[in-house]
Every structure is written in structure tokens, then in C-alpha cells.
Image: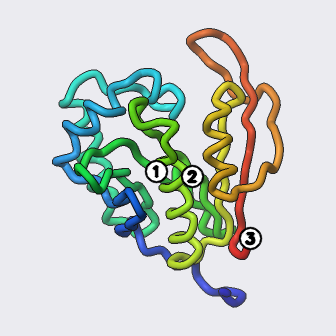
Amino acid sequence: MQSKGEECVHTGTQLIVTERLRLRPFLLQDATSMYGNWIADPAVQSEYGEPACDTINDVNELLMRWTAAYGFKDIYRWAIVLQEDGECIGQIAFCSVDHEHRMADIEYCIGQAYQRQGYASEALSAVIRFAFAETGLHRLQAFHRGRNSASGSVLRKAQMTYEGTLRQSFYYRETGEYDDRIYYGIIKGD
């Protein structure tokens, strides 16, 4: 436990190995695998809240930004890679880190062909264990949109606790509709 006044310790994105996955920093060589499995899929990227990449060049440009950011120790973005064949099937990241309050927001996505096989909850559970064991973070949180109940299942399987719903706080520009944000959290020691 950190004492009063102690700085939050950051390690940056480190290799995490689970039963079926390798969570590791992205590499420029991941572009083809990413493009084929998830990042060009509008359905996956829409649920993730990011635009789909239209070309392999778009993926390469994104990877250049992501890999350059690894120079900062408070950047946490993992490629979710299958151990059996090295395919990059998604990603998991801390989309924001609040240093003062020692907390981070988690986001993740998995390619459609790999969904509903437990990969997201396996990755999320591993990242939670890593964060509490290796960094100074005390709290992790995530939300899913109301229409994406499968993501809520992932959060619950990773032992995160439902904390509340922000009603109609998400706006879909393309349809003009509103949706809820359903929040989950976990603290060190849970």
C-alpha cells in the first residue's frame, strides 16, 4: 500500500501471459493480423467507439502512433494475441489514467470471429491482476453501452462490480439515438 504523498508507480505496457493469450505491446508487424481480424470491422470498432480502418495504410499509421507512445510509462495498450497461432484478435487498454486519484478507465475489443469464447474476460482479468500487482493504481473502471450487454458479461466475469447507470448519456450521431452508460469498477483488495 502506498503511503501518503507517494507517487503512483507506472511500468508501461508489459508482457502478460495467460492460459491462451499473450498480451503484449503492439508491433508494426501486427498490421495485417489486426486488419483481417478486427480493426477494419465497422461492427467491432463501433462498439469500441473508434472508426474502422479502411486500408492497411490506416492501420500502419495508427500503429506508428501507438508504438511511439510506448515511450511513456503511463501508457497501457496491449495487443491480444492467441498463443496457438500468433493472431492479433483484439486489444485492451487504459483509455485514461488519473494519476492524482490512482485510477484508470479500461477499454477492450475482440474480433467477431473470436467473441463469446472467453478471450475478453481472460484478458481483462489478467490486466486487472497486473495493474494491482505492478502499478500504483488503486481503482479500475469501465462502462458498456446499454445495447452491448455482452460487454457487461465480460466485466462481471472479471469480478468487476456494477456501480451505476448514467441514463441516456451516450449519443449515436449516425442514428440520433441515445443509450445508457453502465459502469463497473474494481478496487485493489476486492
Which residue is found at the position 23% from the left and 49% from the top? 85
Q: Which residue is mark 3?
A: 190
Q: Position of residue 38 (x, y in %)?
A: 36, 32
Q: Dot 3, crowdedness within 10 Å: few (<14), some or many (≥20)?
A: few
Horizontal arrangement in the rendering, residue 99 relative to residue 18 (left or right)? right
Q: CA distance from mark 3 to mark 1?
A: 21 Å
Residue 88 figure quarter: top left
Q: Which mark is residue 106?
A: 2
Which residue is found at the position 64% from the left and 60% from the top? 140
Residue nearest the observer in this picture, 65 or 139? 139
Question: Of helix, strand and loop, which one carries label 3?
Answer: loop
Earlier residue among tags 2 and 3: 2
Say if 153 sits above or below 124 in the image: above
Q: Which amino acid, mark 3? A: Asp
Q: Position of residue 21 (x, y in %)?
A: 37, 57
Question: Of helix, strand and loop, which one carries label 1?
Answer: strand
Q: Which amino acid, mark 1? A: Ile
Q: Which residue is mark 1?
A: 92
Say if 187 sits above or below 158 in the image: below
Which residue is found at the position 31% from the left and 59% from the top? 25
Q: Which mark is residue 78?
A: none
Q: Which amino acid, mark 2? A: Ile
Q: Quadrant of the C terminus?
A: bottom right
Which residue is found at the position 51% from the left and 63% from the top? 127
